[in-house]
């Protein structure tokens, strides 16, 4: 299968789906699902393919547009297409009955198509074009709900444009220096570049990718955008779209600059790779703790996304083969469990109409399957053993400890403990505790919403018990970057300094679980009771007043919240207010009075004449 | 096949020993506290009698998760025990090391939290919230301590850490890890959830917190889990800082010494408030552990 055809299907399919929507809603839904599933199948068949196609040469001088596929792009492409397809299936019920649905599907499919385009791009012009398509269609989706979503979208696109401008400077400078934008050609040139130039390229591209992946000083757009976007798109946004920034980082650090140059880049004792690691650690710790303070389910998940991105950045910047494997595996894992969590919150929002953690509770009685899926997602996020998140985090911690960076490992581990607190708060406040009276008549989640969540939950457990499946592919990516090959088995990693064997853990948990369960069964059967049975000792208590969920971690919140102000966001908002004020004062010169405008023209001419008389420039 | 049988035998033996030791400690603890407080106290076998009694009593359940959570919690603690070397026995020695232990220890509060969360009893929810805050409190120094040990021995395998100590002497007596060892002793009551850190149970305020809805076999399970927890908390210290032991008997003796140290604290101190506990945990133990980790990082 040709990779050009893949993109034609992806983009053409989006357009066809949109046009079909004008005729029949049903046909549109069928086409959207069919095309996104077709993309998954085609990409799956491209496994191990490697090709390099020049599809257009007429663009500027010497610039041919190239598409290429290798294991790295395949790995990303399959993640994108699977999460994309699942969120489109989820959308079928979620978006039904809302306005502008044709437009919604068009944009969802455009985002997916452009992301596939990004990872298949073989030169920076193609890369940049797809990058911008992605940014702008994401903007339209974030502001889909209008109202406050408009402001969130604005914030996103402004930061995004600043990022891509920085990237554009880098691209233009590469072109000016080397006369080509082909990624593989540039990487051979860059091998002998001066360290100052490498630093320049890393910073310009780093700003572009950093905004997209929301590394801490550049994260301000993410909490608003993630919480305001429609839930299926939040899943794509958090699951794969921010990973495009990570893809960019892998591309720039490992392919363009090369691992050796990157690790060797230092001046005055500051090594760039260490600074990036520290940024990663900051990105883990602070957002994870901010997440504890959130009361909006999606905002909580959004802050947690930033925290998890920190792990990926830390691991990839660390630049060991274990670290690279852990970081890249975490990309996949985070895509899976965060998409799952956003979808479950979306399902809850779809049924109850709210995602405010203070006004939910007890939904386990009404949506048991959704609860189970959310729990699996939460376990993956925490990294409970036998879920995929555990394996990737284990790899990251191990390399940090054994390479002698215990402080980096400490902050990474601390982020996990914050993750336990906020995920339990999420689970408890939505599903556990007392059921609110207004939610007494809630129905189960429709099957078309459950199906994608079930697929994701199964993937979490599958990759948790058999991590060898993805790790083999990741290992071959690492080897192609010149990293040492790891001793990967289907059950984990064999090593002298501490092996990981998930099958052993699985068997132990399974057998002991069975025995404990049998002992539990052997005890006297328990009577099923309701909330007020024990708590009120059988007397009457008013309903709906006994739920402990508001300010769940109150003593902790009081202690840590003064230290967790998002002053970076405040700083950006301060700048934006300043610019707004300046623009308003500039606007004063447009009085609307013709006389004034004539005066400006006369004054300007007078100025020109004065300059000519005085200095005789022309 | 023969290897398999030995392996299974070892697993059963380890779990059984851990259970006996944990239960013994629970009984002994009540006796010691009673004697310090000028009471006679219940017989040492009281916890076992309680468990047998509780199993035969009726109980109430709030749903599937209510049952599942308590099972999960108990399974978590038993699996942790399989990772901890006791004497020369360590059934899951090469399956992930200390990092897995660190993560499996999470299942213990998480299981209880999920279980009592379904009961929708506000007292239970308050208790869970406090338990997680307390866990965050002691995890900060605990992580620093674990990292100091792992960095010092440059391995994440707890079996190797024990083996290396038999060559170089106990970690506690080697200078780089001295501070970390002291820090562990300072946070041990918090890990085990005894006074002054039994904030999440607080029987007088929130009716035993997460335990409030448990009765019958649920309470029996919770007690067993508590016993295992006691074993885990102490045996990690013995393995990491007191050089483990060559046989279970010697191992038990070392555990007993550590047990006595924190029982005296348990007997005389009143309960902290949650903020006070956090302040304490994030001040002295964290400082000691932090300095300890710096020393380890420098000397390596």
Image (cartoon, rainbow, N blue to C red):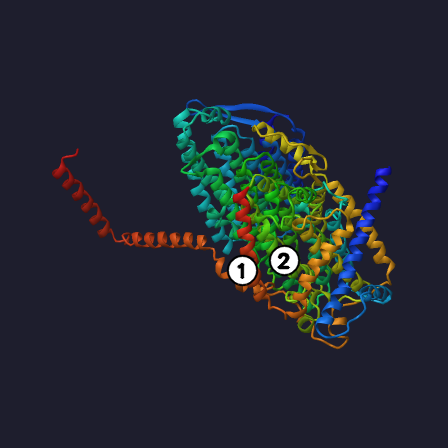
In this picture, is A567 found above or below A337? below
Q: Residues within 10 Å of mark 2 (few under 14, many from 20)?
A: some
Task: Give the labeled residue for mark 2.
Answer: B185
Residue B277 rendering spot, x and y as whole percentages? 59, 64
Question: Residue reaching furthest bottom?
Answer: A539
| Front residue of A550 and A265 | A265
Split into 4 quadrants, where in the image is the C terminus of chain B?
top right
**Quarter-wise, where is residue A444 in the image?**
bottom right
- Same chain? Circles 2 and 1: yes
Residue A548 rendering spot, x and y as whole percentages? 64, 67
Which numbered dot is residue B283? 1
Residue in the picture at 53% in, 30% down = A121
Q: Label 2 to label 1, Cα distance in Å?
A: 14 Å
Question: Residue reaching furthest left?
Answer: A613
Mark 2 or 1, nearer chain start? 2
Horizontal relation, residue A493 to residue A254: left or right: right
Residue A445 rendering spot, x and y as whole percentages? 70, 54
| Front residue of B253 and A475 | B253
Chain containing the residue with disc 1: B
For numbered disc 2, what is the local secondary structure? Answer: helix
Residue A120 appears in the picture as rendered: yes
In this picture, is B274 found above or below A150? below
Residue in the picture at 73% in, 74% down = A536
| Front residue of B133 and A135 | B133
Residue B187 rendering spot, x and y as whole percentages? 62, 59
């Amino acid at each position: 299968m040709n990779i050009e055809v893949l993109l034609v299907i992806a983009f053409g399919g989006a357009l066809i789906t949109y046009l079909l929507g004008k005729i029949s809603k049903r046909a549109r839904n069928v086409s959207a699902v069919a095309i996104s599933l077709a993309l998954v199948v085609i990409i799956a068949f491209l496994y191990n393919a490697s090709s390099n196609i020049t599809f257009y040469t007429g663009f500027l001088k010497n610039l041919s547009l190239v598409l290429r596929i290798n294991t790295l792009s395949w790995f990303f492409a399959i993640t994108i297409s699977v999460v994309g397809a699942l969120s489109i299936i989820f959308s079928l019920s979620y978006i039904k009955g809302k306005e502008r649905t044709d437009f919604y599907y068009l944009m969802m499919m455009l985002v997916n198509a452009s992301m596939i385009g990004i990872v298949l791009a073989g030169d920076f012009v193609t890369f940049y074009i797809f990058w911008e398509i992605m940014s702008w269609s994401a903007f339209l989706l974030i502001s889909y709900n209008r109202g406050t979503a408009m402001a969130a979208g604005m914030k996103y696109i402004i930061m995004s444009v600043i990022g891509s401008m920085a990237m554009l400077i880098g691209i233009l400078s590469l072109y000016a220096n080397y006369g080509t934008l082909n990624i593989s050609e540039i990487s051979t040139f860059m091998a002998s570049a001066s360290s100052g130039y490498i630093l320049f390229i890393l910073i310009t591209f780093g700003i572009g990718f950093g905004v997209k992946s929301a590394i801490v000083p550049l994260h301000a757009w993410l909490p608003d955008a993630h919480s305001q976007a429609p839930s299926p798109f939040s899943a794509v946004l958090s699951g794969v779209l921010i990973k495009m920034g990570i893809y960019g980082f892998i591309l720039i650090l490992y392919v363009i600059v090369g691992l050796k140059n990157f690790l060797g880049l230092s001046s005055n004792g500051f090594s760039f790779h260490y600074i990036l690691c520290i940024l990663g650690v900051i990105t883990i710790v602070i957002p994870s703790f901010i997440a504890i303070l959130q009361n909006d389910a999606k905002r909580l998940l959004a802050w947690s996304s930033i925290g998890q991105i920190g792990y990926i950045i830390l691991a990839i910047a660390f630049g060991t083969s274990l670290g690279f494997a852990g970081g890249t595996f975490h990309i996949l894992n985070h895509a899976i469990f965060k998409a799952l969590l956003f979808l479950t919150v979306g399902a809850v929002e779809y049924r109850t109409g709210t995602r405010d953690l203070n006004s939910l509770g007890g939904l386990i009685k009404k949506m048991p399957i959704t609860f189970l899926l959310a729990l699996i997602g939460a376990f993956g996020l925490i990294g409970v053993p036998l879920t995929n998140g555990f394996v990737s985090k284990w790899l990251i911690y191990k390399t940090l400890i054994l390479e002698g960076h215990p402080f980096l490992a400490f902050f990474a581990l601390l982020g996990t403990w914050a993750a336990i607190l906020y995920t339990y708060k999420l689970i408890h406040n939505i599903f556990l505790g007392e059921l609110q009276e207004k939610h007494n008549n809630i129905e189960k989640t429709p099957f078309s919403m459950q199906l994608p969540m079930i697929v994701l939950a199964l993937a979490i457990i599958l990759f948790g018990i058999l991590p060898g499946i993805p790790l083999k592919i990741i290992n071959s990516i690492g080897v192609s970057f010149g990293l040492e090959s790891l001793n990967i088995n289907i059950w984990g990693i064999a090593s002298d300094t501490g092996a990981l064997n998930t099958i052993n853990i699985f068997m132990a948990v399974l057998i002991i679980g069975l025995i404990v369960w049998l002992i539990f069964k052997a005890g006297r059967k328990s009577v099923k009771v309701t909330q007020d049975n024990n708590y009120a000792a059988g007397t009457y208590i008013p309903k709906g007043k006994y739920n402990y969920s508001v300010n769940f971690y109150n003593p902790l919140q009081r202690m840590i919240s003064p230290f967790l102000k998002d002053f970076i966001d405040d700083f950006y908002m301060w700048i934006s207010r300043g610019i707004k004020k300046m623009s308003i004062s500039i606007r004063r010169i447009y009085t609307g009075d013709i006389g004034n405008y004539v005066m400006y023209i006369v004054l300007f001419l007078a100025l020109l004449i004065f300059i000519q008389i005085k200095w005789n420039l022309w | 096949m023969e290897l398999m049988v030995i392996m299974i035998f070892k697993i059963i033996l380890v779990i059984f020993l851990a259970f006996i030791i944990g239960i013994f400690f629970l009984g002994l603890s009540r006796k010691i506290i009673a004697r310090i407080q000028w009471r006679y106290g219940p017989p040492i076998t009281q916890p076992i009698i309680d468990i047998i009694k509780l199993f035969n009593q009726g109980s109430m359940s709030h749903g599937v998760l209510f049952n599942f959570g308590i099972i999960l919690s108990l399974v978590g603690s038993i699996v942790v025990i399989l990772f901890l070397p006791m004497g020369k026995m360590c059934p899951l020695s090469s399956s992930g090391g200390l990092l897995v232990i660190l993560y499996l220890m999470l299942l213990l509060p998480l299981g209880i939290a999920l279980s009592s969360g379904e009961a929708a009893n506000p007292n239970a929810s308050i208790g869970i919230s406090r338990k997680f805050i307390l866990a965050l409190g002691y995890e900060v120094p605990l992580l620093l301590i674990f990292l100091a040990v792992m960095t010092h021995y440059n391995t994440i395998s707890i079996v190797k850490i024990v083996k290396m100590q038999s060559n170089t002497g106990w970690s506690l007596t080697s200078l780089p890890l001295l501070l970390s060892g002291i820090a562990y002793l300072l946070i041990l009551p918090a890990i085990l959830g005894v006074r002054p850190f039994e904030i999440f149970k607080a029987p007088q305020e929130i009716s035993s917190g997460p335990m409030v809805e448990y009765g019958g076999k649920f309470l029996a399970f919770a007690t067993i889990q508590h016993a295992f927890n006691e074993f885990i908390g102490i045996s990690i210290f013995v393995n990491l800082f007191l050089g483990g032991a060559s046989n279970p008997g010697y191992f038990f003796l070392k555990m007993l010494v550590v047990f006595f140290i924190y029982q005296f604290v348990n007997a005389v101190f009143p309960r902290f408030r949650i903020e006070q506990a956090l302040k304490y945990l994030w001040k002295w133990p964290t400082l000691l552990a932090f300095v300890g980790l710096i020393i380890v990082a420098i000397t390596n």
